[in-house]
Image (cartoon, grey):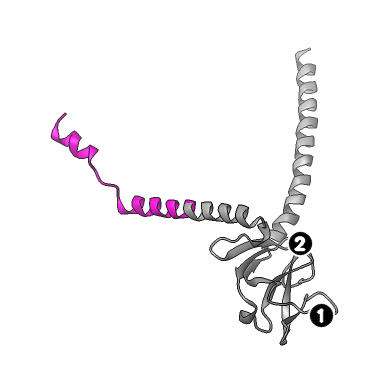
Amino acid sequence: MNKNSIKRCRRRKPYGEIFLDAIIVILIIVFVMNIYSYFKKGNRQLLTFLGYKPVIVKTGSMEPEILINAYVLLKKCDIEELKINDIAAFFHKNKMIIHKVIGIEDEGVKTKGINNFTPDSFIVTKEMVFGKVIAYTNLTSMLVKLSIKTWLLGLLLIFSIVVFGKLFRKIIKQNLI
């Protein structure tokens, strides 16, 4: 081997590759820690990634602000961090609910869905609070509606191709005979 080939073998990684490798290792460690905490706690609803949890809204109680199938990002927090007009995420009867904070009391916070006529009949206590909404997008809601239409258009396209194929074969047979 000559000197040039030895130098190529000992070539250092660029800083960008080292940085990318470090990020991948950190993400793997965080992923493993989350999987461990999932099995240790046994409750998937409490599983977060660095204190954040993405959720898809399944009801229309927060419409027109947050639509059904909207993608919501929650940040884990304590009840003391909630203020009036924050959108809180909490558990009630083993279901996660996302409603707006309309009042703060000694026992907890009063909440209401924007689309609901009356406030919630219960007070949200510190044991019930998961966190608060820090970001959301209704784009996913629109994409879900679009994908249903796309699915129907896809079926129509497949049906059209089949019918066109049969007609095309019939035309070719008539010309060949």
Residue 158, percent across and down? 76, 36
Q: Of residues 30 and 64, which is closer to you in this image?
A: 30
Question: Which quadrant of the structure image shows residue 79?
Answer: bottom right
Inspect the image, locate mark 1, and give the three-letter code of the amino acid beneath it. Answer: Pro
Instruction: Find out whether residue 21 is within the magenta segment.
Output: yes
Q: Of residues 168 and 109, which is closer to you in this image?
A: 109
Farthest residue, direction left: 3
For residue 13, side relative to residue 167 (left or right) = left
Give the label on residue 119, or none.
1
> Which sits earlier in the primary sequence, circle 1 or circle 2?
2
For label 1, the crowd category at 10 Å Cα-Cα, with few meaning under 14, some 14 to 19 and many 20 or more, is some
Q: Which residues are magenta?
A: 1-28
Q: Residues at badges 1 and 2 in contact (C-beta under 8 Å)?
A: no
* Image quadrant where one finds the C terminus: top right
Establish if 57 lies above or below 17.
below
Give the label on residue 58, or none.
2
Distance from Cα at disc 1 to Cα at disc 2: 19 Å
Residue 90, percent across and down? 71, 70
Residue 63, percent across and down? 77, 71
Q: Of residues 38 and 172, which is closer to you in this image?
A: 38
